[in-house]
C-alpha cells in the first residue's frame, strides 16, 4: 500500500459501494462517496447503516473521518481520479439488466482527461464499450473506463473485500487500468492471490459467467436431491461423497429450496438475454432457472402431501425471510414465493426473521403474522418450514418447539437442521432430497 494513498470515489452506497468504501477507508484511503438519496447520506454521516451487514457499522464508524458522503459528484471529482461505480443494475421488466442508474452516472460525469469510471456494478458484456462510445458521443474524450467486477457475498462482505480470492481488472491498457492495478497489487501480493488483468468485455463476462456457474451448480444439486427422494438416497450424504473431488468441490453443493438474492437470478437472466440478443440460446441457463423456480414449490408439495391435499385452515410457520443468513436482504428471497403460494392455498402464515423487520417485509408478506421471536412464530403452527438457515434456528430447543406447535411436521428447506434432534422431540423431520424421518437414525 502507498504511504499516502490517493483518494478514491465510490458512487452508490448500497451493499457493494459502502463495503468497498469502508474497506478502502480502513486501509487509510480518503473515500468520497456519492449517494443519490439524501436520507441515506444523512444516516451514513451519522454512522448509521441503512441495511444489515455483519461488521460493517463498526468499520464505517471507525473510519468516519476518512469517509465523506454527499449527493453530488463535486467533491468526488475534485479529490479523486478513480470513480468506483456501485449503483444497482436490477433485472428490468424485459429480463435484461436495467442500466438506468449506470446511465445516470455516465451522464453526470463531465468531460475530463483526469478521471476514470471503475465499474463494480455487474453489467452485461459490452456495456463498457457502449459507455466509451457514449463518452465520445457526449464529447467527453479522455475519460477512462475500467471494469473491476465485485465478488463479495452479502453476510460476509466485510471479510470478502479484505480477503478476495482474486481481483479482476478489465481495461484498455491505459493509465486508468494501471492506477486500479496499483491500488490492488499490494493486497494481491500480501494475500498471494491472482490479479487478473484482461480486456474489458472479458472482465464483464467473468462476473456473469461466475454467478451463472454458481447458480447452475445449485440447481444441479437440487435436481440430484429430487432424484434422491425417489430412489431413497440422502443428498447430504451424496454431496459429502462428491465434495472431496477437487474438480467438484463442496461449496454450493447444498440442496435446498432454491437460491434467491439480488444477484444470481438477475445475472443468470442477464447472461441468458445477452446471449439471446446475440442470436445464441443458452439452454443450460434456461433449465437452471426453471429448476430454481420449481424447487421453491417443493415445500408446498410436501405440505400438501402431508395434509391430505389441502392447506385450508392450516397454519404454517416460516422461519427466516432473508434470502440467506446474516443479511436482511429479501430481494428474490424464497420466503416471498412461499408465503404467497401458501396463502393462495388457503393457509395462514406466521413468519419470523432475526434481522428482517415487519416494516421492511410487510408489503411482501400479504396477511402473514409477524412473530416477535422464533418460539412465538411456531406457536400453534401445524407445520414449521426452515426457509433461512440462521444459526439461532438451527440451535432451537426442539422439545420447546414441539410443545408450542399444534402439529408435528418440520420441513428443513435448507438441510441445515439435525434430524435426530427433531425426531427426538417427537416431531417429524422432512428435508430436501432425503427421506422423511420419524425415528432417529443410526449414523
Ligand atoms: P444496492 O441497491 O444495495 O445499492 C445501490 C445504491 O446506489 C443505492 O443506495 C442507490 O440509491 C445508489 N444509486 C443509484 N443510482 C445512483 C446514482 N446515479 N448516483 C449515486 N447513487 C446512486 O445495490 P448492491 O447490492 O450494492 O449492488 C450494486 C451492484 O453490484 C449491482 O450491479 C450488483 O449486481 C453488483 N453486486 C452486488 C453484490 C451483492 O451481493 N449485493 C455482489 C457483487 C456485485
Image (cartoon, rainbow, N blue to C red):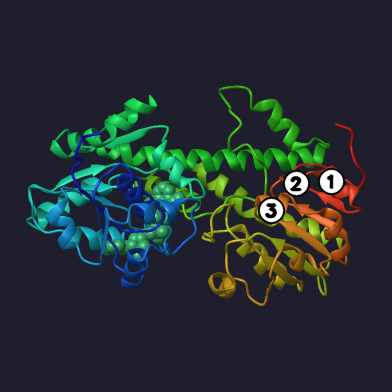
- The residue at the point 69 percent across, 53 percent down is 392
Q: Which is more toward the observer, 439 or 8?
A: 8
177 in relation to 140, above or below: above
Q: Which is more toward the observer, 394 or 132?
A: 394
Q: Nearer the viewer, mark 3 or mark 2?
A: 3
- For label 3, the SS is helix
Q: Are marks 3 and 2 in contact (CB under 8 Å)?
A: no
What residue did someone put label 3 on? Answer: 392
Report the Cα–Cα distance between label 3 and label 2: 11 Å
Could you say where residue 430 lies in the image, as x and y percent from the top left? Answer: 81, 49
Drawn side of residue 437 relative to residue 349, left or right: right
- For label 1, the SS is helix
Q: Which is more toward the observer, 319 or 95?
A: 319
Name which quarter of the figure residue 321 lies in: bottom right
199 in relation to 118, above or below: above
Q: Which is more toward the observer, 278 or 201?
A: 201
In this orientation, does residue 387 appear? Answer: yes
First reached walking from the N terminus: tag 1 or tag 3:
3
Quarter of the picture containing the C terminus is top right
Drawn side of residue 235 relative to residue 332, left or right: right
Could you say where residue 381 lies in the image, as x and y percent from the top left? Answer: 81, 67
- The residue at the point 18 percent across, 57 percent down is 76
Could you say where residue 237 lies in the image, as x and y percent from the top left? Answer: 75, 32
Cβ(mark 2) to ligand 1 < 8 Å? no
Q: Are marks 2 and 1 in contact (CB under 8 Å)?
A: yes
What residue did someone put label 2 on? Answer: 417
Drawn side of residue 298 relative to residue 88, left or right: right
In this orientation, does residue 273 appear? Answer: no
Cβ(mark 3) to ligand 1 < 8 Å? no
* Disc sitting over residue 421 in the figure: 1
Amino acid at each position: 500500500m502507498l504511504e499516502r494513498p490517493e483518494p478514491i470515489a465510490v458512487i452508490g452506497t448500497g451493499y457493494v459501494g459502502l463495503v468497498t468504501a469502508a474497506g478502502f477507508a480502513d486501509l487509510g484511503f480518503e473515500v468520497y462517496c456519492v449517494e443519490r438519496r439524501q436520507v441515506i447520506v444523512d444516516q451514513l454521516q451519522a454512522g448509521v447503516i441503512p441495511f444489515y451487514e455483519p461488521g460493517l457499522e463498526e468499520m464505517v464508524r471507525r473510519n468516519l473521518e476518512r469517509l465523506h458522503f454527499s449527493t453530488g459528484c463535486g467533491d468526488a471529482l475534485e479529490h479523486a481520479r478513480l470513480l468506483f461505480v456501485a449503483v444497482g443494475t436490477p433485472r428490468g421488466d424485459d429480463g435484461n439488466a436495467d442500466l438506468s442508474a449506470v446511465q445516470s452516472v455516465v451522464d453526470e460525469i463531465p468531460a475530463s482527461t483526469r478521471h476514470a469510471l471503475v465499474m463494480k456494478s455487474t453489467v452485461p458484456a459490452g456495456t463498457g464499450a457502449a459507455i466509451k462510445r457514449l463518452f465520445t458521443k457526449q464529447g467527453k474524450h479522455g475519460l477512462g473506463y475500467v471494469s473491476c467486477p465485485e465478488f463479495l457475498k452479502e453476510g460476509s462482505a466485510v471479510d470478502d473485500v479484505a480477503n478476495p480470492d482474486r481481483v479482476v481488472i478489465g481495461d484498455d491498457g491505459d493509465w486508468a487500468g494501471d492506477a486500479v492495478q496499483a491500488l490492488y497489487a499490494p493486497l494481491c501480493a500480501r494475500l498471494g492471490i491472482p490479479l487478473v488483468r484482461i480486456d474489458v468485455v472479458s472482465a464483464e463476462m467473468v462476473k456473469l459467467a461466475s454467478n451463472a456457474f454458481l447458480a447452475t451448480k445449485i440447481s444441479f444439486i437440487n435436481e440430484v436431491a429430487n432424484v434422491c427422494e425417489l430412489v431413497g438416497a440422502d443428498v447430504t450424504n451424496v454431496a459429502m461423497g462428491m465434495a472431496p473431488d477437487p474438480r467438484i468441490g463442496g461449496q454450493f453443493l447444498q440442496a435446498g429450496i432454491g437460491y434467491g438474492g439480488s444477484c444470481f437470478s438477475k445475472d443468470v437472466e442477464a447472461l441468458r438475454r445477452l446471449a439471446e440478443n446475440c442470436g445464441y440460446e443458452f439452454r443450460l441457463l434456461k433449465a437452471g432457472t426453471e429448476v430454481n423456480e420449481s424447487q421453491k414449490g417443493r415445500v408446498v408439495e410436501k405440505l400438501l402431501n402431508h395434509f391430505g391435499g389441502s392447506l385450508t385452515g392450516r397454519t404454517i410457520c416460516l422461519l427466516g425471510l432473508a434470502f440467506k443468513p446474516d443479511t436482511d436482504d429479501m430481494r428474490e428471497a424464497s420466503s416471498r414465493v412461499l408465503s404467497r403460494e401458501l396463502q393462495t392455498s388457503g393457509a395462514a402464515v406466521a413468519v419470523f426473521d432475526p434481522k428482517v423487520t415487519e416494516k421492511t417485509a410487510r408489503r411482501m408478506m400479504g396477511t402473514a403474522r409477524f412473530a416477535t421471536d422464533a418460539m412465538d412464530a411456531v406457536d400453534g403452527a401445524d407445520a414449521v418450514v426452515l426457509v433461512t438457515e440462521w444459526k439461532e434456528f438451527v440451535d432451537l430447543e426442539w422439545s420447546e418447539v414441539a410443545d408450542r406447535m399444534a402439529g408435528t411436521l418440520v420441513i428443513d428447506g435448507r438441510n441445515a437442521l439435525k434430524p435426530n434432534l427433531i425426531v427426538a422431540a417427537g416431531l417429524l423431520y422432512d428435508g430436501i432430497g432425503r427421506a422423511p424421518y420419524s425415528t432417529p437414525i443410526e449414523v
